[in-house]
Structure formats: structure tokens, C-alpha cells
Image (tube, rainbow, N blue to C red):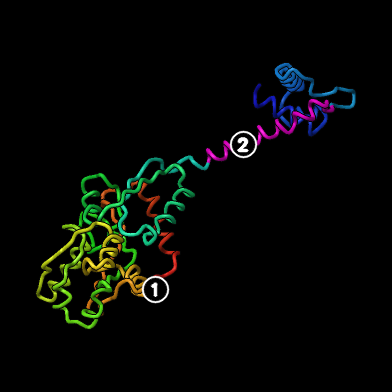
Amino acid sequence: MELNQLRSFVAIAKIGHLTRAAETLHLSQPALSGQIKALEEHLGVSLFQRSSTGMALTPSGRRLLPHAERIIGAVQQLGDAAQTLRGQPTGKLVIGTVLDPAMLRVGDLLARVAERYPQLEIELHHVVSNEALSGISNGTLNASFYFGARPNDGLAAIALRDITYRVAVPMAWAEELADAPWEDVAARPWVMAPEGSSHRQLILELFRERGSQPDRTIESDNEFVIANLVESGVGVSLVREEVAQPLQEAGRCIIWPGASAITGLWFTYPNERYDDPLLQAVLSALEDVWMTAPAEA
């Protein structure tokens, strides 16, 4: 059974006349008649009742006509879908994520990419800030979200937003430290991310600006674990404002008002990959997501 036979079957059924159907299909009458005969032999049923005035569907023909139309429609849809895919970027990108995926709008980004570039696969790897840059440098990541100072000259970076960090203090220490000077806050244990991370650098910069350094530190590479350690009374830390504010409102920590830190959130990738069609597709979706998203409070 061939697709042309089904198209001939549908055309004759709609027109009701062999000669006029042949003209519509740009076929000779014998060729069209031969296609219908071959289709009937393949299906094992008679499709038309022939008369001097035209051709009418048999009961079998009426039952099979909707099936033939669906097959022709499905083939057309297949061709249309293939047409939209021609010339689209095809392949996989490995992208690093940091902090909270919701803050990065990762869900919106993946949805936009899937809609526009169905042949582009994105694999996400959650990393800490220093791993983002090293991953791009050593090729394990094709691009990454990153927070901290602007990446070095070997990397291109798109600024997405500023991030404010507040000094979060356990509720158990609130009475002692709410209005205490920096020296008293600095003397407590501090929870920070591992060596080389942007979070650690922000804390160390606070201390450097005040001519001191932390005496006791506890490490964690997850911002929600850091916030939980503050809640649990383990230590003081810098906590992202969007995380620290609800904790204070819930009575689970206090925000010490004497200091804060502001850093940038970036999307970064190697300069030499700028013309890569896969990366360009992601950058296009990224721009759309961040340009159309509500402004940060």
C-alpha cells in the first residue's frame, strides 16, 4: 500500500468521479484506476461502486475513508515537523548551576529552550562558584551560572542581577548580638563555603574591611545547609537576603544590621564559543527569560 494510492482513494471519494479526480491529481485516468485497483487488492475489499454517472463509496469504502484521511494527515504533520527542525541547532550543552535554581529561573530557561530548540539537550550540573569557573576552563562545563566578582578575561559574562547577602545570627544569640559591635559578631564561629568559593570570599572581605579574620569556621557547600546551621545555633554567616528575610520573619534567626555584602549573578562561558550555534540558542532563550521577568525587589 502506497501513500499515493490513499491520496487517490480520498480524492475520488470527495469528487465522486474518476476522470475529474484524475485531472485534479494530474494523473491519467488509467493510472488512477490502476492505483485504486491495487489498493483494493491490497486491502481485500471493494472501495467504490462504479456507474455511468460516477463512483460512489461502498460501505467498506465509507468505513475506511476516515482512516485514510488520518494517515495522510499524519504524514503531512510529520513533514511539517521535519521542516521546522531543518537547520536548527542539534546537540548537548552541559551548564552549571549555583545557589537556588528558582532564583536562576532555570525552569523558565529549559522550557523556553525546549519550545524553540527541540533538538538541543541541556544537562545541568549543580556546582559551587569556584567549580563553575574551573569547570568551564577544563571543559567539563560548556557554560555556567556564577556569582561573585566578574569572571576573568578568558570568559565572557552576562550580568543577570545583583545579590545582597545579610549577616544572619542564630536566635539563641539574638539578645547578645542584635546591637553588638562587629568585634563581638566576628568572634563567634562563622559558617562559610569551601576554599575558593565566592561565598567564602564575601565573608573574608567583610573581615578584611574591618581589619580582622575569623577565628573559628565551619564549612558547607550548600546555601540552605548554611542557613540551617545558622538556625541551629552553630554559627553566624552571610545568607542571601531572599533566604535570610523569611527566616527572620519566622523568628528563626536575626539579621545583624551592621554589615551586608552585594555581589553579582552572571551567566558565563568561554569567549571562543560565542559563535557556537548551541550556545547562541541558549543565550537567546536566557535573554528572553531575564529581560521579560519581573524586576527584582
Up/down of 43 relative to 102, above or below: above
Residue reaching furthest to the right: 52
Residue in the image at 44% along x and 56% along y: 108
Is 207 in front, or is 182? 182
Residue reaching furthest to the front: 172
Estimate the spatial distance between the alpha carbons at disc 2 and disc 1, rounded to whole Å: 49 Å
Residue in the image at 20% along x and 64% along y: 191
Say whether residue 227 is left or right of residue 30: left
Which quarter of the picture shows residue 65? top right
The label shown at residue 76 is: 2
Q: Earlier in the sequence, mark 2 or mark 1?
A: 2
Residue 262 location in percent, x, y? 26, 71
Up/down of 9 relative to 225, above or below: above
Q: Nearer the viewer, mark 2 or mark 1?
A: 1
Q: Quadrant of the N terminus?
A: top right
Which quarter of the picture shows residue 193? bottom left
Q: Is residue 97 magenta?
A: no
Q: Which three-letter amino acid code belongs to the residue tagged 1?
A: Ala
Q: Quadrant of the C terminus?
A: bottom left
Is 155 in front, or is 228? 228
Question: Can residue 150 be seen in this snapshot?
Answer: yes
Q: Which three-letter amino acid code belongs to the residue tagged 2?
A: Gln
Q: Residues within 10 Å of mark 2 (few under 14, many from 20)?
A: few
Q: Is residue 73 magenta?
A: yes
Q: Which residues are magenta?
A: 56-83
Up/down of 23 relative to 123, above or below: above
**Residue located beneath label 1 in the image:** 297
Mark 1 lies on a secondary structure that is loop
Which quarter of the picture shows residue 254? bottom left
Question: Can residue 168 be seen in this snapshot?
Answer: no
Is 255 in front, or is 151? 255
